[in-house]
Amino acid sequence: QQQVKQSPQSLIVQKGGISIINCAYENTAFDYFPWYQQFPGKGPALLIAIRPDVSEKKEGRFTISFNKSAKQFSLHIMDSQPGDSATYFCAASSTSNTGKLIFGQGTTLQVKP
Amino acid sequence: NAGVMQNPRHLVRRRGQEARLRCSPMKGHSHVYWYRQLPEEGLKFMVYLQKENIIDESGMPKERFSAEFPKEGPSILRIQQVVRGDSAAYFCASSLSTSYEQYFGPGTRLTVT
């Protein structure tokens, strides 16, 4: 029940295309859903996050879509650029509990020029 | 405003030695989380601390691992009698509270030879 399942494991997109990464969770106590971007040899960097009171959040080229009834959320990267090539992790936590993040397995994105 | 700081960035230990990993949270943050990332895997929660208190250590191996966050100074993750399986990247993250974003440090890459 603590798992967060992420797909796909890897993704190749042409420059200018849309990258879509999906995550699903089981624990209904989760109420905070961030996405992190990680480059090789670096720490995860917070990209964008959503709470379940909204169904979508957009920041620049990055959008989170959230479906509470399906217990799914996704990251859309519009106009993907080679600089977006990185590993992306979704996560979930219960802010009324300890707030520890449960991470998905990660998606390696390659954006081809 | 400095971000989360971790040192050392790289640490090599022989089997049986001790490893000490340090984490200084962002200014004003009193909540610290430690995560471990094994090669080619996602991030796994280890322990959550507030100043002078361990709040949740459900992700910590029962033996050889310990953590502290003293009133003064950085949080420390200590691994005694390291084994090859401890080789991983260890990240700490800090937050204002369980309801707020977690910001990650650059990590300590531990190699056990």
Image: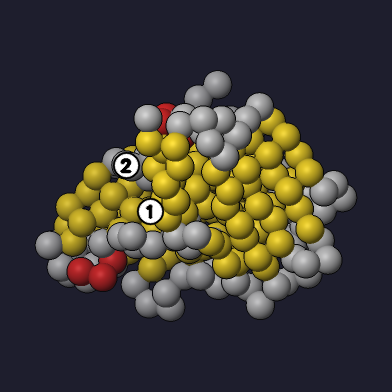
Front-most of residues A58 and B59: A58
Left or right: A32 as drawn, with respect to B43: right
Q: How is the image coloured?
A: secondary structure
Front-most of residues A10 and B70: A10
Front-most of residues A92 and B46: A92
- Look at the image and tell me whether residue B72 can be seen: no
Q: Residue at x 63, y 47 (%)?
A: A75
* Circle 1: element type: strand
Q: Chain of mark 2?
A: A
The residue pinned by badge 1 equals B90
Front-most of residues A51 and A17: A17
The x and y percentages for residue B111 are 20, 56
- Inspect the image, locate mark 2, and give the three-letter code of the amino acid beneath it: Gly
The x and y percentages for residue B103 are 56, 40
Q: Label 2 vs label 1: CA separation? A: 12 Å
Q: Residues within 10 Å of mark 2 (few under 14, many from 20)?
A: few
Q: Residues within 10 Å of mark 1 (few under 14, many from 20)?
A: many
Q: Chain of mark 1?
A: B
Q: Residue at x 61, y 57 (%)?
A: A22
The x and y percentages for residue B49 are 58, 56
Q: Residue at x 28, y 66 (%)?
A: B86
Which corner quadrant of the image does residue B19 belong to? bottom left
Q: Residue at x 52, y 52 (%)?
A: A89
Position of residue B84 relative to residue B62, above or below, is above
- Inspect the image, locate mark 1, and give the three-letter code of the amino acid beneath it: Tyr
- Look at the image and tell me whether residue A9 can be seen: yes
* Circle 2: element type: loop
The x and y percentages for residue A83 are 42, 29
Left or right: A3 as drawn, with respect to A63: left
The residue pinned by badge 2 equals A41
Do dots 2 and 1 share one subunit?
no
